[in-house]
Amino acid sequence: MLDERSQRGRLQVVRQKWSWIVPDGLWEIAEPLLPPTRVRPQGGGTRNIPATVLWPGRDPLFPSAWTDQLDQYFADLQLQTCAGSDTSCRWRPRTNSLTP
């Protein structure tokens, strides 16, 4: 929630941006119609989007020991490892069984 001073500052910026279309006399009517400003949480954290990571089984650039760090960045993680050569480790889109 924004304090009154921050809200006034925000409205001043909005007034400057839209002053060409909304005359000064109409701001008393227009200001209550503006949506409230959402305060975005700071600090990063984990993503709430489901993610699938396709991890190579044997690769000198991506050792499998690094997979334990992925939980710090993804909340809902599905890890799939590929064994074998490069050709077996290709991303394949999920198929929908309902598609004709």
Image (cartoon, helix red, strand yellow):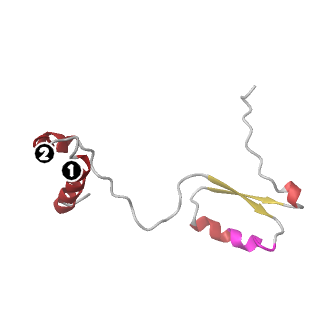
Q: Earlier in the sequence, mark 1 or mark 2?
A: 1
| Residue type (three-letter) at the residue carrying disc 2 | Asp
Local packing at callout 1 (Cα closer than 10 Å; few below 14, some 14-19, many 20+) is some
Give x and y (percent) for residue 3.
20, 61
Residue designated by label 2? 24
CA–CA distance between discs 1 and 2? 8 Å
**Depth check: 85 or 31 in front?**
31
1 and 2 marks in contact (CB < 8 Å)? yes
| Residue type (three-letter) at the residue carrying disc 1 | Arg
Numbered mark located on residue 74 in the image: none
Residue 65 is covered by the magenta coloring: yes
Give x and y (percent) for residue 97.
74, 32
**Depth check: 40 or 24 in front?**
24
Residue 61 is covered by the magenta coloring: yes
Circle 2 — which element? helix
Residue designated by label 1? 15
Q: Report whether 88 appears left or right of 49.
A: right
| Among the 4 quarters of the image, the one containing residue 99 | top right
In this picture, is 85 found above or below 30? Answer: below
State the residue at coordinates (59%, 55%).
76
Give x and y (percent) for residue 30.
18, 41
Q: Report whether 72 appears left or right of 98.
A: left
Residue range highlighted in magenta: 60-67
State the residue at coordinates (13%, 45%).
24
Give x and y (percent) for residue 43.
43, 68
